[in-house]
């Protein structure tokens, strides 16, 4: 028997009728059940409509109608019934609807199952069940409004039906299949936004009313609550996002307010110090009581606020950044980054040298230096500080001005701990080690002299042995040492050979310090001078008056060095030598005479050495080191990545060098160009913003 | 067929002979090269100045390696390409050559060639500011007069750079091509422009606000 063709209208009418019955059954409104016969009828009709020859094959129309029918049911029936209820009641209705919806979709998809056999797979369409379940998303908006209002009520401290919310969220996760599209799009995104707004409002009212401490306590409570919310009724994948969002909204305003407040305090301190300092001199290397007080205050301020955050349970980089930025004003001197770095190094010097103007107990000094190390770890130009520190460390160690080697060591250890990388601290670390060697060998040297009386020069002297390469390269003066000093040198060389065979000693006369008792007419004064000064002065023990050329031949010094030495002894505060003629410059025709009438209140006089350092020179040195560091960073990054654009390269460089200093884009560009010049990199021919690594 | 091919080869050989003869009128007999003096003569024969951009274009066509000298090989490459074997034909061919070079695809190549051509020493990678200014005037001024004039002015007043390298040289061409002038509205210093152009733009902006 041949079926007669079913026209669309006719077929669809019959399908609709059956489905209406099915609906009533699901809603519990029908007295007669939807039995096997009903199902067979519906299935057969659909089967026939799908298998008729074209143009009467209605697969596509049926597929579309299937979806349409479910959608209609949702908008015409479910939506209005949700709309009349509110909050919990509405959500309860939502849950109930979902249960029925699932049943409906399941049964309907059975009826339309023939579509799933050929039509759907051949066109890779979404399967019937998923299409049906997805229609329920229409209701998500309603549910979201109600759910969020419940969440907000919980945030305000009310008790809500968490189980219900958990069900609702569960449904929404279920709708979106594996990828959870529905949950992510309909709930999560909106939740983050509304939570952000909620906490941003809270933050601005708290910032106006609460103390920082109360604010933090509240913020902490909020965070705990949000985590609770997630664990009780949101999907676990939302936790990180939500917590981050809330942290951002709560902490950012506090961090900003905090930064403003601390910046103001820093500004006040700097201003105060500036006002105190005499008006004509800004801070420029000169380190006096004012500067010392300033650094001390800055240090205390930093310690105070650092402690504030360590006490809080919440550790968040936002606050550390704020704390770091607050001190910008202190760090930024006349040359970017120099003021604070230089003053802080001078401050350390003051605590570590034996004639500093603040005498502290070991305990107090240790404590202060620990604070300094912490402050340094918050600097952006750590390298600059280390360079200034080194410049002051060297004379401290070499000219015996350090109060206590243990203190030096413990501070270096502090720095190592705080700065991490060995790159910054390894040199100062090894310098201090050199001094330790010297100290450790002091006793064994005197024992050596004791047991070898024939080489004992009879003078009290010590030698500091420095490792080549660690220290600045000093000029080995061509100096004819006086006989007394020569015997000392020979004695030590003999001793050193017993200690180690394969190391050669080079004597750096420019760094020596001598204590000379000088008999002036009124009294004997102990002069503390350099080896050169000493050698020169000793010439006058045999002669009252010497010409420049006589001194020149006897000492064998370079002219420049000789002039400088003569200058230090015949000009300035202490005129030990009198120059003839008494003019401002030293010329080869001058002659010199020992000033036997010299006198002073002191028993011991220190003739000044050369200036410590020039700030500008230090900055130049640091800039040079930075150039090397940037070059190395760029090549290392590019070797790995091969191709990068300027912005990515910049970000990677900042990441790599941030613990030492923060490179700026201009210097980076300059270094890139230099590397292009040297054929390490090339610019992409098409896109000039991209650089390529050349092997 | 065979005959025709043979006659074509013959004609080509004839042509080559004429090109070689043309070469020999200017070549220095002892070195076998056309040296600066020979180039000078060639210029006066075709009535152009030796600093004229068209001579540089000729050198580009010959792929000449060394400034001020043409080898026979280079001469053949160039003149075969423009099908010229005497001074009259050359004079006539110059405007056509210029047109060819000015075509955008050729011009970039010519522009970078002009820089390489000026590198006279081995391992030399950069050119001093004065020469660069001259080269800019010859090569680029006819197209970008305002940019070139200002850049030359800038180069002569600044103290940061004594020489210009290839990257900067090509960067300036891209600058002329891409940057709206004189408003500079699409110049973004965040992009990887050579630093010298950042500085140039800064200098320009300062100059504009002053006036």
Image (cartoon, coloured by chain):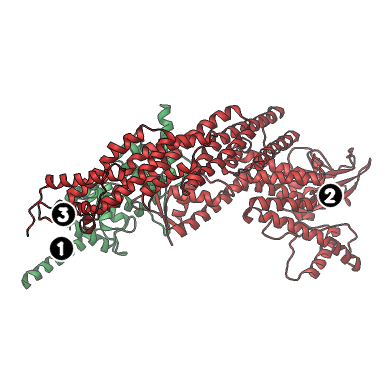
Chain colours: A red, B green
Q: Chain of mark 1?
A: B
Q: Are marks 1 and 2 on the same chain?
A: no
Q: Quadrant of residue B20?
A: bottom left
Q: Residue at x 66, y 53 (%)?
A: A425
Mark seen at residue A537: 2
A277, above or below A566, in the image: above
Mark 1 is surrounded, within 10 Å at the Cα level, by few (under 14), some (14 to 19) or many (20 or more) other residues, namely some
The residue to which callout 3 is attached is A50
Q: Left or right of A85: which side holds A10?
A: left
A640, above or below A176, in the image: below
B80, above or below A139, in the image: below
Mark 3 is surrounded, within 10 Å at the Cα level, by few (under 14), some (14 to 19) or many (20 or more) other residues, namely many
> A23 or A499: which is nearer to us?
A23
Where residue A268 appears, x then y in whole percent?
A: 66, 29
Helix or strand or loop: what does disc 1 sit on?
helix
Q: Chain of mark 2?
A: A
Q: Is residue A688 at all visible to an observer of this figure?
A: no
Mark 2 is surrounded, within 10 Å at the Cα level, by few (under 14), some (14 to 19) or many (20 or more) other residues, namely some
The residue to which callout 1 is attached is B15
> B46 or A427: which is nearer to us?
A427
Q: CA distance from mark 1 to mark 2?
A: 92 Å
Where residue A414 appears, x then y in whole percent?
A: 70, 51
Q: Are marks 2 and 3 on the same chain?
A: yes
Mark seen at residue B43: none
N-terminal of the pair, mark 2 or mark 3, is 3
Q: Is residue A641 at all visible to an observer of this figure?
A: yes
Q: CA distance from mark 3 to mark 1?
A: 81 Å
Q: CA distance from mark 2 to mark 3?
A: 120 Å
């Amino acid at each position: 028997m041949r079926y007669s063709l079913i026209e669309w209208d006719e077929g669809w009418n019959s399908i609709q009728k059956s489905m209406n019955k099915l609906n009533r059954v699901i809603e519990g409104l029908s007295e007669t059940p939807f039995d096997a016969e009903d199902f067979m009828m519906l299935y057969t009709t659909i089967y026939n409509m799908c298998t008729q020859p074209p143009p009467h094959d209605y697969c596509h129309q049926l597929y579309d109608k299937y979806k349409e029918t479910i959608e209609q049911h949702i908008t015409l029936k479910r939506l209005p019934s949700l709309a009349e209820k509110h909050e919990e009641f509405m959500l309860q209705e939502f849950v109930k609807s979902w249960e029925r919806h699932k049943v409906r979709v399941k049964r309907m998809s059975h009826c339309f199952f023939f579509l799933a056999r050929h039509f759907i797979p051949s066109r890779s369409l979404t399967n019937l069940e998923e299409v049906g379940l997805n229609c329920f998303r229409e209701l998500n908006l309603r549910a979201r409004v109600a759910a969020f209002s419940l969440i907000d009520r919980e945030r305000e401290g009310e008790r809500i039906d968490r189980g219900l919310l958990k069900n609702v969220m569960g449904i929404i996760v279920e709708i979106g299949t594996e990828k959870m599209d529905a949950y992510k799009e309909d709930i999560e995104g909106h939740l983050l936004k509304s939570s952000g707004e909620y906490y941003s409002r809270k933050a601005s009212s708290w910032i106006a009313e609460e103390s920082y401490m109360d604010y933090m306590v509240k913020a902490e409570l909020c965070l705990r609550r949000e985590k609770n919310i997630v664990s009780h009724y949101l999907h676990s994948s939302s936790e990180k996002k939500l917590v981050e969002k809330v942290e951002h909204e709560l902490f950012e305003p506090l961090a900003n307010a905090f930064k403003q407040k601390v910046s103001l305090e820093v500004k006040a301190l700097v201003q105060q110090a500036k006002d105190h300092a005499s008006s004509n001199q800004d801070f420029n290397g000169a380190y006096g009581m004012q500067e010392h007080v300033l650094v001390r205050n800055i240090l205390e301020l930093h310690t105070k606020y650092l402690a504030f955050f360590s006490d809080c349970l919440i550790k968040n980089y936002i606050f550390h950044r704020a704390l770091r930025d607050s001190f910008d004003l202190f760090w930024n001197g006349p040359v970017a980054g120099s003021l604070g770095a230089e003053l802080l190094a001078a401050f350390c010097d003051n605590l570590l040298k034996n004639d500093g103007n603040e005498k502290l107990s070991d305990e107090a000094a240790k404590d202060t230096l620990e604070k300094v190390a912490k402050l340094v770890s918050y600097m952006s130009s750590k390298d600059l500080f280390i360079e200034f520190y080194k410049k002051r460390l060297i004379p401290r160690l070499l000219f015996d001005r350090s109060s206590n080697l243990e203190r030096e060591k413990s501070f270096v250890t502090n720095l190592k701990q705080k700065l991490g990388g060995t790159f910054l601290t390894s040199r100062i670390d090894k310098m201090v080690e050199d001094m330790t060697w010297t100290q450790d060998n002091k006793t064994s040297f005197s024992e050596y002299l004791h047991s070898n009386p024939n080489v004992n020069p009879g003078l009290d002297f010590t030698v500091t042995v420095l490792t080549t390469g660690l220290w600045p390269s000093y000029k080995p003066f061509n100096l004819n040492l006086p006989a007394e000093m020569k015997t000392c040198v020979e004695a030590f060389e003999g001793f050193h050979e017993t200690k180690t065979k394969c190391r050669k000693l080079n004597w750096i006369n420019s760094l020596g310090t001598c204590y000379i008792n000088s008999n002036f007419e009124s009294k004997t004064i102990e002069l503390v001078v350099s080896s050169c000064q000493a050698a020169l002065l000793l010439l006058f023990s045999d002669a009252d008056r010497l010409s420049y050329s006589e001194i020149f031949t006897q000492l064998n010094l370079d002219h420049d060095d000789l002039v400088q030495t003569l200058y230090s002894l015949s000009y300035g505060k202490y005129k030990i030598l009198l120059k003839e003629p008494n003019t401002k410059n030293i010329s080869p025709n001058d002659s010199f005479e020992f000033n036997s009438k010299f006198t002073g209140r002191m028993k011991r006089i220190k003739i000044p050495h050369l200036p410590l350092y020039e700030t500008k020179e230090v900055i130049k040195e640091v800039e040079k080191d930075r150039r090397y560091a940037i070059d190395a960073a760029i090549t290392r990054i590019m070797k790995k990545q091969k191709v990068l654009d300027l912005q990515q390269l910049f970000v990677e460089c900042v990441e790599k060098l941030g613990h030492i200093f923060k490179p700026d884009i201009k210097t980076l560009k300059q270094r890139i160009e230099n590397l292009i010049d040297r054929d390490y990199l090339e610019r992409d021919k098409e896109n000039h913003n991209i650089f390529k690594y050349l092997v | 067929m065979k005959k025709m091919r043979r006659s074509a080869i013959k004609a080509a050989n004839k042509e080559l002979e004429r090109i070689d003869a043309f070469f020999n009128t200017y070549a220095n007999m002892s070195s076998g090269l056309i040296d600066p003096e020979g180039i000078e003569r060639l210029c006066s024969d075709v009535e152009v100045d030796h600093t004229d951009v068209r001579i540089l274009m000729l050198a580009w066509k010959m792929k000449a390696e060394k400034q001020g000298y043409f080898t026979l090989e280079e001469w053949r490459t160039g003149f075969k390409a423009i099908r010229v074997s005497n001074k009259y034909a050359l004079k006539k061919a110059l405007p056509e050559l210029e047109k060819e070079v000015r075509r955008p695809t050729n011009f970039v190549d010519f522009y970078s060639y002009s820089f390489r051509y000026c590198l006279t020493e081995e391992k030399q990678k950069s050119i001093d500011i004065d020469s660069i200014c001259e080269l800019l005037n010859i090569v680029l001024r006819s197209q970008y007069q305002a940019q070139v004039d200002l850049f030359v002015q800038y180069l002569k007043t600044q103290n940061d750079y004594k020489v210009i390298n290839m990257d900067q040289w090509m960067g300036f061409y891209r600058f002329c091509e891409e940057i709206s002038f004189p408003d500079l509205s699409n110049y973004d210093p965040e992009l990887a422009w050579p630093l010298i152009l950042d500085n140039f733009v800064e200098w320009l902006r300062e100059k504009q606000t002053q006036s």
